[in-house]
Amino acid sequence: MRLLILGGTWFLGRALGEAAFEQGWSVTTFNRGVSAFDLPGVQVIRGDREQPGDWSRLAEHGPWDAVIDTIGYVPSQVLAGAKALEPVMGRYVFLSSVNVYTGWPNEPLNDVSPVFDCPPDADADFGADLGYAGQYGALKAGCERAVVETIGTDRATVLRPGVILGPNEYVGRLTWWLARAERGGHLLAPGPPERPIQPIDVRDVARFAMRCATGRQNGSFNLTAPVGHATFADLVSACIDTTGADTEPVWVDPSWLVERGVQQWTELPLWRTHSGVWNVDSSRATEEGLRCRPLATTVADTWSWMTAGGAAVTGSGEASRAADHGLATLRELEILRAWTMRA
């Protein structure tokens, strides 16, 4: 069996390649080759999805039993790629996002919740008036249309992950919490401790994507851990236990943090007070075989990767996003001091 991964060097793309190798697949990757290392054992084809001629050149290396697109963001580019690859492929799996839902993160979601309306040939400027998150969601929705309308509903699968964590993460969410736990002392933790969270392990996303590449899972699927899978306290405790540090969480009232101007999602990664952010129904994917490992396993495996030198990749290229996450040390101390002195 032959698999083409569009992307294939960072995080999810890397996990997909490893999952494919485990199943005995031959793997080809298509990317620019400027931001990360290629997975050993893959056939590498260099190209830029912004260049129509590169799509034609890529298609000459087919056929493939399946294509998995991990990096599609601009509908017109996804449309061009889908048209070029459709004659030389079997199934097409597109990695989208829960951001396509107009209600995220403000309301609970399921697989049939309303999504943004974006044409399949839109360019990168579409939805600029929606703000960063809205534009991202609208463009991803346009990419979904480009795939489904070109490949057909009988051969296309759309996956909509929420937050993905695990080894090789470059965004800086779980890696920041682990690094902060290792530092010890009083750790500012956004309450309430029992707040449910639904991050999913990158390897579980990859395995479900491969399942879709080999099966007949048509339509769209939300990919999150089940509601009730873990809490914020589970996350913080796992980070402290895994690092073995002398760290004590101080649970702070979320409304007080908002009043103090603490930035949700970035200064305190994975923390957000919106009612729908961790209320995404992924039961349809579960019925089709999605399995989610315990959050503590994801945390421990990420720490093993970090301490083996993996965290070094988070300092350059696309991985520089990690610099946008986490509270500065002095700011955390000031907030903790203000919290204890508030009476």
Image (cartoon, rainbow, N blue to C red):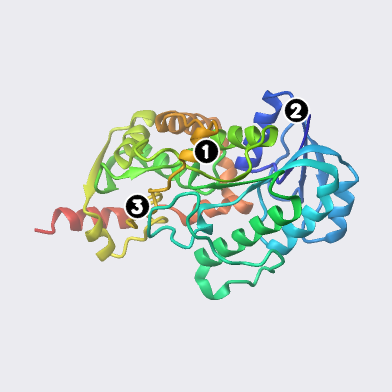
Q: Residue at 69% across / 24% down in the picture?
A: 23
Nearer to us of marks 3 and 1 is 1
Query: In front: 290, or 261?
Result: 290
Estimate the x, y position of residue 75 in percent, counting from the top left: 69, 62
Residue marked by disc 1? 285
Q: Earlier in the sequence, mark 3 or mark 2?
A: 2
Q: CA distance from mark 3 to mark 1?
A: 40 Å
Nearer to us of marks 3 and 2 is 2
Q: Earlier in the sequence, mark 1 or mark 2?
A: 2
Q: Amino acid at mark 2?
A: Trp
Estimate the x, y position of residue 44 in percent, counting from the top left: 81, 40
Q: In this image, 151 relative to 137: left or right?
A: right
Q: Residue at 70% across / 40% down in the picture?
A: 37
Image quadrant where one finds the C terminus: bottom left
Residue 114 visible in rendering? yes
Estimate the x, y position of residue 123 in percent, counting from the top left: 69, 69
Q: CA distance from mark 1 to mark 2?
A: 23 Å
The tally of labels here is: 3
Q: Earlier in the sequence, mark 3 or mark 1?
A: 1
Residue marked by disc 2? 25
Q: Amino acid at mark 1?
A: Ala
Q: In this image, 65 relative to 320: left or right?
A: right
Q: CA distance from mark 3 to mark 2?
A: 46 Å
Residue marked by disc 3? 329
Q: Amino acid at mark 3?
A: Thr
Query: Up-down: is 20 above or below 313?
Result: above
Query: In front: 25, or 46?
Result: 25
Q: Residue at 13% across / 57% down in the picture?
A: 341
Q: Residue at 82% across / 61% down in the picture?
A: 51
